[in-house]
Amino acid sequence: MSERPLRIAIFGESYLPYLSGVTVSTEALARGLGAAGHEVLLVAPAPARGRVVGTAGALGPDPRSAWLPSIQLPRPAPAGYRVPWPIPSAALRAARAFAPDVVHAQSPFTSGLMARRVARRVGSPLVFTHHTRFGDYGHYLGPLARPGAALVAAYLRRYWAGCAAVVAPGTELAAEIEARLRGRRRPVVLVIPTGIEVAAIQALAARDPRPLANWPPGAMVVATLGRLAPEKSVELLFDAFAGVAANHASLRLLVVGGGPSEAALRERAAAPDLAGRVHLTGQLPRLEALAIIKGADLFVAASRTETQGLVLAEALCAGLPVVALAGPGVADSVRDGIDGLIVPAEPAGERMMRLGDALRQLVDEPELRATLGAAALAGAPRFSVASRIASMVALYRELLG
């Protein structure tokens, strides 16, 4: 006898049309569960009036939705980033009436507390996916960074302990959670990365970035994709690229994304060692962004605050060899020496040099680039949404059992 479909309520702290790794992951989970035959209720902050939720490209049916009253956070929160307003609402009543088998929170904060209350009310297990390394964002708190980090760490331990299961998208993060839960009630801690629509990315028509940036047809394009913010170390990447470009006249850098560091990076790109060699696209819809990087020759990333390296996996699915600075989640996506090069991050003073050396190696060795790119395409099925959803459903059924 086949097992019955499940009813899953997914609570998000943010959602589309705001584009981030978390909103992409939340949509992939909601639509992926629907495609697998399960019934989903998405409980998330309502978009601003006049904005259309849309899609980031995940396949599967539109999830049934219950929109929470929402507000736009003040700076430094980015424009369009809306979070739930913690008041009673029709959305919460709908979540309770939905009678979910499982409640799945995507954040430990306002929506996560709402999810916990609903789970307790209906007697369902609470699953939490820990998407963000919150400790890496303390610089936004200025002088409150240290006490703020301590408070958040203590709060997270309490929240994890109140869950039936905690899902970590990467192995390093799972190990950290396990270590920090010692001496407390232990939920199930499991590594399940966000799934990617591999076939859809591979079917995208590549868009040549050279005409877009007024570069010559023979330019070799290095691409990077993601939020432009201090914790993503884009400045380090610029400096490493400048060192390589000094001896490679055809080399260009394509920067796809937006964020608080964009103005400073545009100013850096205008400096004599980079002028005319760097193009910043600003924020783009996800599928358009992926089509543009698919037209590049290789991909590079220097972020030190990933949980699974989602953009790395997307680049690999597009067939790009990857150069990445070692950090949490990187090795979950990039297979060093097989489909990319992972650059040691320590000692910190040598990061720029080592990143430049790896870039230079791929620029100078077209056969190696081709070999890594072919391996990236061949290994992409390991990122598929279907396999990740199957793992998540197995976890749900284990908890219900």
Image (cartoon, rainbow, N blue to C red):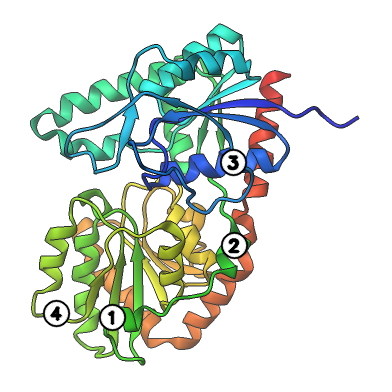
**Above or below, comparing residue 54 to residue 348 in the picture:** above
Marking on residue 252: 1
Label 3 sits on a secondary structure element that is: loop
Q: Position of residue 67 (x, y in %)?
A: 45, 27
**SS for tag 4?**
loop
The image position of residue 301, as x and y in percent, is: 34, 62
The mark closer to the camera, 3 or 2, is: 3
Residue type pointed to by label 1? Arg
Residue at image point 23% right, 82% down = 245
Mark 1 touches mark 3? (CB < 8 Å) = no
Q: Quadrant of residue 144?
A: top left
Label ID, residue 200: 2
Compared with 177, 315 (above or below) is below
Residue 308 x/y as whole percent = 46, 48
**Residue name at image x 73 percent, y 19 percent:** 401
Q: Considering only order in the chain, which callout, 2 or 1, is on the residue closer to the N terminus?
A: 2
* Residue neighbourhood size for the residue with mark 2, other residues' Cα within 10 Å, grouped as few (<14), some (14–19), many (≥20): some
Residue flagged by tag 2: what amino acid is it?
Ala
Q: Residues within 10 Å of mark 4 (few under 14, many from 20)?
A: some
| Residue that label 4 marks | 275
Q: Nearer the viewer, mark 1 or mark 2?
A: 2
Q: Is residue 250 above or below residue 48?
A: below
Label 1, label 3: how far apart the Cα atoms are: 39 Å
Residue 20 drawn at (x, y percent): 38, 47
Do the residues under discs 4 and 2 have CB atoms within 8 angstroms? no
The quadrant holding residue 204 is bottom right
Circle 3 is placed at which residue position?
Answer: 62
| Quadrant of res 348 | bottom left
Q: Which mark's residue is nearer the viewer, 4 or 2?
A: 2
